[in-house]
Amino acid sequence: MKKISLILILLIAAGSAQSAPKIDLVYPPEGADIGPVSWSFILGSVTPGSQLSVNGRKVDVYKTGAFLAYIPFDSGEFIIQLSALDASGIATLDRKVNVAQRKRTIRPDSLCILHGSINPNYNLSLPVGERLYVSFQGTPGCKASFSVGRSLGFPMQEQNAATEADDKILAFSDSSTADTSVVPGIYGGSCLIQGSEGWESQRIYFYLVDLLGNAVIDSTGPIISNWDDTRQVFAKVKDSIAVLKTAPGLGYEMFMPRGMILQINGIHDQYYRLKLTETKEAWVKKSSVEFFPAGKIFRTAKLALVKTAKAARGSQLSISLSRPSVYQVFPGSDGRSLKILLYDVQADMDWVRYDPADGFVNDIRWRQVDSRTVELEMSLNNKLWGYSAAYQKNTLVLSLTAPPAINKKNPFKGLKIALDPGHSPDNGAVGPLRTLEKDINWQITQRLGRMLKKEGASVLYTRENGEGASIYQRPSRAAGWKADLLVSIHNNASPDGANPLLNSGYSTYYYQPYSRGLAETVHRQFQKNLPLNDHGLFYGNLVLCRATEFPSILVEPAFIIVPREEALLLDGAFQEKIAKAVYTGIKEFLLNTK
Ligand SMILES: [Zn+2]
């Protein structure tokens, strides 16, 4: 005891000297808004050799001075207090962040509708006859209802609603289930959208009445209107690429080129809803399309003919339609087949004309899967390397590419390999020592590029150092250059709420079935050569993996936010090791081709 207090006195005395340990808290930044987490991570650095405590808990400091801690967070305004101590003294730092409410429960004796709990929380326009679903959280055990314009008293019932799991945290956790316990006081109800007067741009009001007859009204609900089918219905894509999503704010479903005609039948905040067929919908950002004048119509397209033609490497299909229509291409997992769905199309097809010189396409058949969807199914005589699809007037031209000829002695010779150094102009993830992911990605990419060039490959960087490129520019630069293959290089970080002590190491991502082999051979090289945790091989619905023209993968060789892995990523020898692993993985994939 005596000894300790003596040290403390000495330290306090030293603290009055001018120098004290430095504290640099990199993440979260001051005033950050953090989701409804109960534990999350912080990272930064202190003078190497310091002792660090965060909110009274001792935190490990890596030899570089970097730290990464997983600490409890309270909801609301939350202060992270750091104190570092070394022989020169003590330093402290306070960081204030805002943590969203996790699960709010309302006291049964306070009658209220919880602010911000109303769903939908955006304005909507839907066709007459469609069902609208609404909900809010309020005092449990009451009577609830809602009104739209002059239509009063649609009933609501208390639901057994569970909180929704955060899929990001689920992907980064080691358990298969998340906390989805039931929250009391969630009321839900529905009504049909009506065409009568009083349904034009009306706000939804919500009512909650307790057992004593006391009532509260909430007037912060969204504005609802009926979508009038007689006004503008057709629009066309005005961006170079429009992203169609499964629902507003959810995942990518397909990408459509400029000029594509879309039928719209609903508005949801920042999105239009597309009616692809009677049963299939998709969503597009409002800003991506422009309307044709009211009254302009486009009839359901007719599919008349499919022709094949031998191409330089593979085959070209001409799918003749009476007008361009939304399509989706699905390469098969067997690597030798393909399905195409054509929406708002009816088949009137008596012929498929095969080019006798084309040995790539084996067989094509069609079927009308529902009244307005045609499916084309084709089998191939060789592996599919990639494809591209584009309209030339009313004809959908689908180019199917066969694998390149690989020189077994020198598989890289004559190949064109696109390398994508992730991020820039944005920094990407930032390590505890403020190492920028974009810089490390660039350094590894260059090392890999040098190795590939030495073996006779041509290499395209989707961006140069210091240059910025958007996420959509990158695959399109590679396709414009007619690349044979694309590898995107990143380094990882965990989302808020995930435990970074359980998430570390390398991972590999693919989307197209014909990219899976490349993801596997590269991942195997990571397993053999990187002294890190195996974070996994992933299917990833990522723009860089969605390139269609060639096999493309994205790699995350390490977690830049983990102090030990950040130190490794800063080491040239380790960067070389990563580059070599990717190089060897690509080589193995090429040698397996055919
Ligand atoms: Zn990244």
Image (spheres, rainbow, N blue to C red):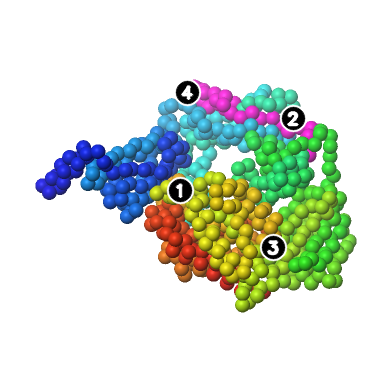
Q: Choose between 459 and 186: the one closer to the eye.
A: 459
The residue under label 2 is: 195
Q: Choose between 312 and 88: the one closer to the eye.
A: 88
- Three-letter amino acid code at disc 3? Gly
Nearer the viewer's eye, disc 2 or disc 4? Answer: 2
SS class of the residue under badge 1?
loop
> Would you say the residues marked 2 and 4 are in contact, meaning their CB atoms lie under 8 Å apart?
no
> Would you say the residues marked 1 and 3 are in contact, meaning their CB atoms lie under 8 Å apart?
no
Residues at marks 1 and 2, CA–CA distance in whole angstroms: 53 Å
Q: Position of residue 324 (x, y in %)?
A: 81, 49
Q: Is residue 218 magenta?
A: yes
Q: Choose between 113 and 566: the one closer to the eye.
A: 566
Q: Earlier in the sequence, mark 4 or mark 1?
A: 4
- Three-letter amino acid code at disc 4? Leu
Question: Residue 517 is drawn in which quadrant?
Answer: bottom right
The residue under label 3 is: 386
Q: Is residue 554 left or right of residue 40?
A: right
Question: What residue appears at the point 54 percent right and 59 percent down from the top-left corner?
Answer: 446
- Three-letter amino acid code at disc 1? Val
Q: Position of residue 194 (x, y in %)?
A: 72, 31
Residues at marks 2 and 4, CA–CA distance in whole angstroms: 36 Å
The residue under label 1 is: 430
Q: Residues within 10 Å of mark 2 (few under 14, many from 20)?
A: some
Q: Is residue 316 left or right of residue 553?
A: right
The residue under label 4 is: 212
- Three-letter amino acid code at disc 2? Gly
Q: Earlier in the sequence, mark 2 or mark 4?
A: 2
Nearer the viewer's eye, disc 1 or disc 3? Answer: 1
Q: Is residue 37 magenta?
A: no
Question: What residue appears at the point 52 percent right and 33 percent down from the top-left corner?
Answer: 117
**Above or below, comparing residue 97 to residue 208 in the picture:** below
Q: Residues within 10 Å of mark 1 (few under 14, many from 20)?
A: many
